[in-house]
Image (cartoon, rainbow, N blue to C red):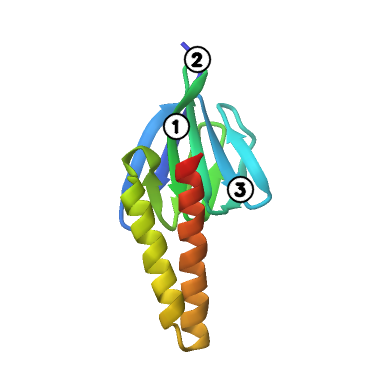
Amino acid sequence: MAETTEFELVSPGRLLLSEPVEMAVVPGTEGDFGAMPRHAPMLSTVRPGVISIHNGGKVTRRLFIAGGFAEVTAERCTILADEAIDLADLTPAAVQERLQAADDLVKEARTEDEKRAAERARFLAQALAEAARG
């Protein structure tokens, strides 16, 4: 059996996932990194993108995250995510609905704060749509 590291994905409201993995590839803001057993300790901000969970020498799960922070130690990788979605649970209709809602926010935004928030929502919806395709 391959050596594993504990992987935890936490959202603001709850622990979403906690399981041993051979490797988790995380979209860090400075580039993707693979968290594996005996990894050197590090902290990183995380950009919107896909976390790929590897077990048995292959990708076994793909999770979209909207950003956050990662802490990696020799024994574990903990992701504190702004938002997380298991891509296996995502439907094309849900992606389209999110894209439409973001476009509506952009059209309705009046103040600078609303415009910034709407552009962020559109950026995340587009990143999610790209993740769902790939």
Q: Which mark is residue 2?
A: 2
Q: Position of residue 15 (x, y in %)?
A: 33, 47
Query: Three-letter amino acid code at disc 3?
Result: Gly
Mark closest to the chain's N terminus, 3 or 1:
1
Query: Residue shown at 45%/46% (left/top)?
Result: 64
Relative to 28, 99 lies left or right: left
- Seen in the picture, residue 116 relative to 66 is either above or below; the reply is below
Q: Position of residue 14 (x, y in %)?
A: 31, 51
Q: Which mark is residue 123?
A: none
Cβ–Cβ below 8 Å for labels 2 and 3? no
Mark closest to the chain's N terminus, 2 or 3:
2
Residue occupied by mark 3: 28
Q: Is residue 81 visible?
A: yes
Circle 2 SS class? loop
- Count the marks: 3
Residue occupied by mark 1: 6
Judging depth in this view, the residue of 66 and 19 nearest the camera is: 66
Query: Three-letter amino acid code at disc 2?
Result: Ala
Q: Residue placed farthest to the bottom in the image?
A: 111
Query: Three-letter amino acid code at disc 1?
Result: Glu
Relative to 74, 84 lies left or right: left
- Seen in the picture, residue 115 relative to 9 is either above or below; the reply is below
Q: CA distance from mark 1 to mark 2?
A: 13 Å
Judging depth in this view, the residue of 42 and 64 nearest the camera is: 64
